[in-house]
Image: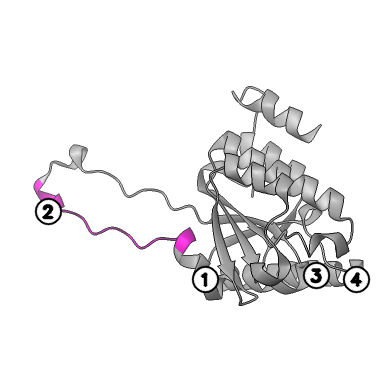
Amino acid sequence: MLIDVETSQLVLVDYQARLMPVMWESDLVVANAVRLAKLAALLEVPAFYTEQNPAGLGNTVPALQAALAEARAKVLNKMQFSAVEEGLGEWLRPPAKPVQGNARSLPKHLQKPAASERSAMVIAGCEAHVCLLQTALDLLEDEFEVWVVTDACSSRTERNRDAAFDRLAGAGAELVTTEMVAFEWVRTAEHPAFKEMHALIK
């Protein structure tokens, strides 16, 4: 199964100023998070990001903040480790709007189909074994598809990061890379955004 851009949303977890300097391979991880945010902007994928206790850990690192602004991403400040416990699920799957008036009074060809649900969560973040893990497991519990972008995730130690990936894969999350996301979102070299996408990952 490939990641469908039409059903995707991007969630980036806790790339914060006081946290990133102690993350394993942090420069690479931030660079890939920036690529994901720029891809979301390019392909009009809804984007969200979280900040854990920003008073203590600071705000999102500036390079990523700029890319998220480009993607018009919405920020969720949280104290719980799982962003779902703070209401992220409601942002990702807003309640259906009630039909106005009597929809059955319209001929079938004039009735609007329900908007397709964006149920594929492309998610990455820090720390992989804490906030990312708990958020991703809760999203799986809420019956979202979860695609964890491994090269945009980190923990203070490689072992903790890898343990998170093992557990997430066992729970049903798909483990992918930034380039997998990019190429699956565009699918073809004939896509109008292919050249811009390719420039982002080169």
Left or right: residue 33 versus residue 26 is: left
Residue carrying label 1: 142
126 over 106 or under it: above or below: below
Q: Secondary structure at mark 1?
A: loop
Label 4 CA crowd tier, 10 Å (few <14, some 14–19, many 20+) = few
Mark nearer the N terminus (2 vs 1): 2
113 over 59 or under it: above or below: above
Q: Nearer the viewer, mark 2 or mark 3?
A: 2
Circle number at residue 166: 3
Mark nearer the N terminus (2 vs 3): 2
The amino acid type, in three-letter code, at marker 3 is Asp
Residue range in magenta is 91-105
Locate residue 116, reporting x and y percent.
Answer: 41, 49
The answer to which image quadrant residue 11 occupies is: bottom right
Residue carrying label 4: 159
Q: Nearer the viewer, residue 150 or 50?
A: 50
The amino acid type, in three-letter code, at marker 1 is Asp
Label 2 CA crowd tier, 10 Å (few <14, some 14–19, many 20+) = few
Left or right: residue 156 versus residue 46 is: right
Q: Nearer the viewer, residue 14 or 39?
A: 14
Q: Nearer the viewer, mark 4 or mark 1?
A: 4
Residue 195: within the magenta?
no
Residue carrying label 2: 101
Q: What is the CA distance from the residue labelled 4 to the residue labelled 3?
A: 10 Å
Mark nearer the N terminus (4 vs 3): 4
Locate residue 108, reporting x and y percent.
Answer: 18, 42
Q: Secondary structure at mark 2?
A: loop
How many numbered discs, if any?
4
**Are discs 1 and 3 less than 8 Å apart at CB?**
no
